[in-house]
Image (spheres, rainbow, N blue to C red):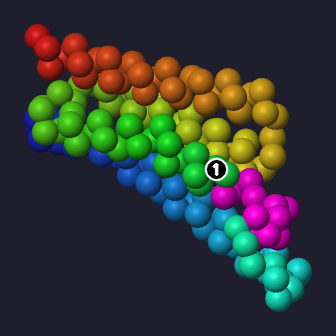
């Protein structure tokens, strides 16, 4: 495989993670619009942040997950350009990137659908471990 194509292979899981973020955002948008239509807000429903949160509480899981996708994944989105810039994209990093994205997708599905909290937490921890492995690998690769 041409070296440039090999380096670019890590972009596919990155694109997949961006698609996941948009999918969760779209789910949030649809659920909130449906909620607004089925439960028209009162004059004071958005008077304060707390009231707005209370109003949307029945459809809050996608919002919680969307916020979560801007926590640890920020470290992933920071790492990919560093890997590309330094030429440190490896097969291992690309496999780990796919593992990370698959775990994040599983986490999002469980989170948005209100699934088992313990299973969701286990998947979250696994995704954090994969991301940590990516950063450790990067640190080792640039230090030699």
Is residue 14 left or right of 69 when viewed as pictured?
Answer: left
Q: Residue at x 13, y 39 (%)?
A: 85
**Image quadrant of residue 94?**
top left
Which of the image's four quarters has the N terminus? top left
Q: Which residue is mark 1?
A: 65
Q: Residue at x 73, y 72 (%)?
A: 48
Seen in the picture, residue 58 relative to 131 is either above or below; the reply is below
Q: Position of residue 80 (x, y in %)?
A: 28, 39
- Residue 115 visible within the image: yes
- Residue 40 visible within the image: no
Seen in the picture, residue 31 relative to 87 is either above or below; the reply is below
| Residue in front for this viewpoint, 66 or 9 | 66
**Image quadrant of residue 39?**
bottom right
Is residue 61 left or right of 142 when viewed as pictured?
Answer: right
Seen in the picture, residue 39 relative to 43 is either above or below; the reply is above
The outermost residue toward the top is: 144
Q: Position of residue 81 (x, y in %)?
A: 23, 42
| Residue in front for this viewpoint, 1 or 46 | 46
Stretch in magenta: 50-63
- Circle count: 1
Q: Is residue 53 magenta?
A: yes
| Residue in front for this viewpoint, 68 or 127 | 68
Is residue 139 left or right of 2 when viewed as pictured?
Answer: right
Q: Is residue 23 magenta?
A: no
Is residue 124 left or right of 134 when viewed as pictured?
Answer: right
Q: Residue at x 58, y 52 (%)?
A: 67
Q: Position of residue 19 (x, y in %)?
A: 48, 57
Secondary structure, mark 1, is: helix
Which of the image's four quarters has the C terminus? top left
Q: Main secondary structure of the magenta part?
A: helix
Seen in the picture, residue 101 relative to 55 is either above or below; the reply is above
């Amino acid at each position: 495989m041409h070296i440039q194509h090999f380096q670019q292979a890590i972009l596919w899981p990155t694109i997949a993670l961006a698609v996941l973020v948009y999918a969760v955002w779209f789910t949030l948008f649809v659920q909130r619009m449906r909620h607004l239509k089925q439960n028209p807000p009162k004059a004071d429903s958005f008077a304060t942040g707390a009231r707005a949160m209370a109003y949307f509480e029945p459809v809050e899981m996608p919002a919680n997950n969307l916020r979560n996708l801007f926590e640890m994944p920020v470290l992933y989105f920071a790492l990919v350009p560093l890997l590309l810039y330094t030429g440190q994209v490896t097969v291992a990093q690309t496999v780990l990137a796919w593992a990370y994205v698959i775990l994040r997708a599983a986490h999002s599905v469980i989170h948005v659908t209100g699934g088992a909290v313990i299973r969701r937490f286990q998947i979250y921890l696994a995704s954090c471990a994969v991301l940590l492995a990516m950063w450790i690998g990067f640190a080792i690769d640039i230090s030699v």
